[in-house]
Image: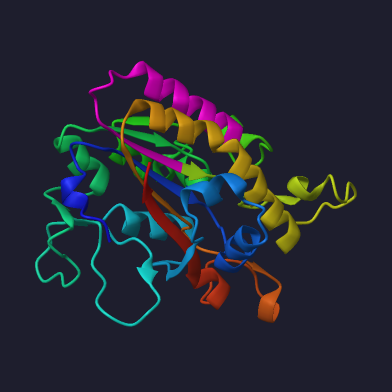
Amino acid sequence: MLDVNALVGTHDIVFITFDTLRYDVAQSRFEQGRLPNLAQLMPQGWEARHSPASFTYAAHHAFFAGFLPTPIEPGNHPRPFALSFEGSTSIAPETCVLEAGSIPEGLAAQGYRTICIGGVGFFNQRNPLGQVLPNLFQEQYWSPALGVTEPISTDNQVDLACALLKDLPPNQRVFLFINLSALHQPNYFYWAKADPDLKQDSLESHGAALEYIDGALAPLWQCLKDRAPTYAILCSDHGTTYGEDGYTGHRCAHPVVWTVPYAEFIL
């Protein structure tokens, strides 16, 4: 784990959740050379980890409390971020411990501008439930153009992120969170070039959505590099099933739901 204490205050921080991305699909696409932009940033590929929850709302609550996906090897694994909490055994000297109720609120108290660019329904701000997670941030953004039914949602999220970053003074540190919606159902349209008649999500369309994301994120990496040194965390909140053992979807205790891809690096 990086010494996050040494990064907070000097680095921008970007946290991107690839909503619903399965580890097996993510790593196989990486090994096949089909994620060229991400491969430049994480040449070793994805790390397999265990999610703290099986669906978006619960997983993100855990994430924003500092409980990111846990390495799958047994042991007591230190965390990059934590909130002050008696009895925690996963806080190390490198852990950034914040005196707040959430990571976004704690970083705001450290002088960061906190920005949430939502994707799936739990970030849509259309009802009280859809406001809970975004309201942890100073700025919150969502529209149907960023949501699950929009085939170019990641392009739109990246365009918005870059515009917001460019409007901020260079010396203003930023915590940027993006919940990518493209992988979440429906995702069949990303496989339409191969099979125009397909109207059902599948492992192939799931992988095709990730390949789309890989290309769409490229301008964001350049924007972040141009602005400031950046600590990046990329992960999925949970996987999803496509008929394995009779299951379809998530919010179930299946290995492909609990095992998620994770990466962190400095830009």
Quarter of the figure with the N terminus: bottom left
Asked if residue 259 is among those painted magenta in the image, a careful observer would answer no
**Residue 190 at x, y percent in the picture:** 74, 46
Residue at (23% x, 49% y) in the render: 102
Residue 64, compared with residue 32, is above or below; it is above
Kindly tell me whether residue 202 is visible in this rendering. Answer: no
Numbered disc total: 0
Q: Quadrant of residue 69?
A: bottom left
**Residue 18 at x, y percent in the picture:** 51, 51
Q: Residue lying farthest right? A: 197
**Residue 97 at x, y percent in the picture:** 14, 54
Residue at (22% x, 33% y) in the render: 112
Rendered image coloring scheme? rainbow
**Residue 61 at x, y percent in the picture:** 34, 55
Quarter of the figure with the C terminus: top left
Left/right placement of residue 50 relative to residue 84 reads right
Please state which of residues 20 and 16 is positioned toward the viewer in this rendering: 16
Please state which of residues 129 and 260 is positioned toward the viewer in this rendering: 260
Residue at (61% x, 52% y) in the render: 184
Asked if residue 167 is among those painted magenta in the image, a careful observer would answer yes
Kindly tell me whether residue 1 is visible in this rendering. Answer: yes
Query: Bounds of the magenta span?
Result: 154-178
Residue at (20% x, 36% y) in the render: 10
Residue 158, compared with residue 192, is above or below; it is above
